[in-house]
Amino acid sequence: MEIMGTRVKNAVLLLFIMGIGFCPPFMEGKEIAEVNVQQLRKLASKYNVTSLLVFGDSSVDPGNNNVLSTNVKSNFPPYGKDFFNARPTGRFCDGRLATDFIAEAMGFGETVPAFLDRTLKPIDLLHGVSFASASSGYDDLTANLSKVLSLPKQLEYFMHYKIHLSRLVGHDKAENIIRNAIVVLSMGTNDFLENYFLEPQRRKQFSLDQYQNFLVSSMSHNVEVMHRLGIRRLVVVGVPPLGCMPVVRTITNQITTCSTTFNRAAYAFNAKIKLKLAAMEANLGLLTSFVDAYAIVQDAVDNPTAYGLRETAKGCCGTGLVEFGETCKGSTTCSDPQSYVFWDAVHPSQNMYKILAAKAIQSVAQDILS
């Protein structure tokens, strides 16, 4: 994500001026979902799950931005500190992302490769790839502001993927792979933090409620395109509690607590996404699952010891208060990132992604593989 200090401060002031209210409380006391890998793989086999295909932003981008003309990148240390061979890959994390852990649990390999990775081989396409681009969003303007891949552009690359896959295994088998794939869509954060609350264009066009509806409509349109392209199993990841991000806490001077103003915007948007998903499931015949990233991250922040975590208010990189992306580059890091909710001032740690993955697998098993 690309958030400039002065612009974020202006956004925060605007939020308070707009009078955004309080966020409904989240139920406490949730236990960490344990993943029975053997059982999951039996379910995946029973329901003929063929691959994992991923669309979204930095939460699921394994390095597509590396080859783009954008400054939204993380293919340098200390990113990748806990990845295999301590290698920075372009993931905005110390290690792997939730989608990597989901792929591994399903037996599709230890990572989900980036579609634009120049070392990608045709055989790598069989079990899935990610088209995600850090700093993207449901609003095309969000991606354009940072010169990254919009969701329609990601879908264009997905069409290229279909062509390559057909050449590899034949048209009918390629269609079967796509029809039985689990498809993950994870974005929305940047539409608020980088776009609506920072740039004037959308605020002149929409109230916050109207903008949320605009994003939901955009999401719906793109899901309809996915459906036309053969996708039938869709997992949508909700927006996390934006007000709990260390950079937002820092700017709002709420180090000891999450910003309810930002959280309410995320909470309300997620509610609209869930309603639209239910409607699309009925109208399009999709199998869908909603992963409540808001609830999962909020509970980890509220009850860290229940998840084996300790630090909830700052990231592991640098001071942990403002650094991410380029400003994290070359910074010193904490000695125990596994105990942190956040790796940098915006993005979750590898350990937090493990927790998100476990919860996501639980949702998928319940909603799609049952």
Image (spheres, rainbow, N blue to C red):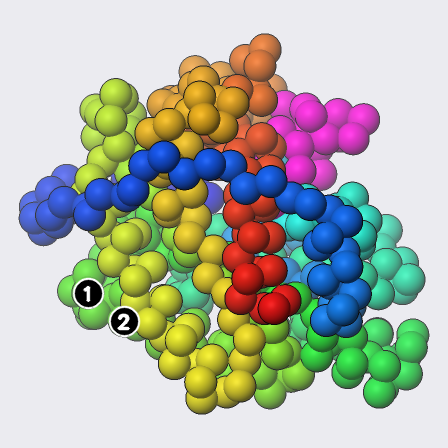
79 vs 370: above or below: above
Amino acid type, label 1: Asp
Left or right, 367 with respect to 90, comes to: left
Query: For numbered disc 2, what is the local secondary structure?
Result: helix
Q: Quadrant of the C terminus?
A: bottom right
Say which residue label 2 marks: 213
For the residues labelled 1 and 2, say whether their Cβ atoms are less than 8 Å apart. Answer: yes
Where residue 129 appears, as percent x and y from the top left, is 73, 59
Name the chief secondary structure element in magenta.
loop
Amino acid type, label 2: Asn
The boundaries of the magenta stretch are: 77-98
Q: Residues within 10 Å of mark 1 (few under 14, many from 20)?
A: few
Q: Is residue 186 magenta?
A: no
Q: Residues within 10 Å of mark 2 (few under 14, many from 20)?
A: some
Where residue 26 appears, as percent x and y from the top left, is 28, 43
Quick one: 96 or 48, which is closer to the camera?
48
The numbered mark at residue 50 is none
Say which residue label 1 marks: 209
29 vs 227: above or below: above
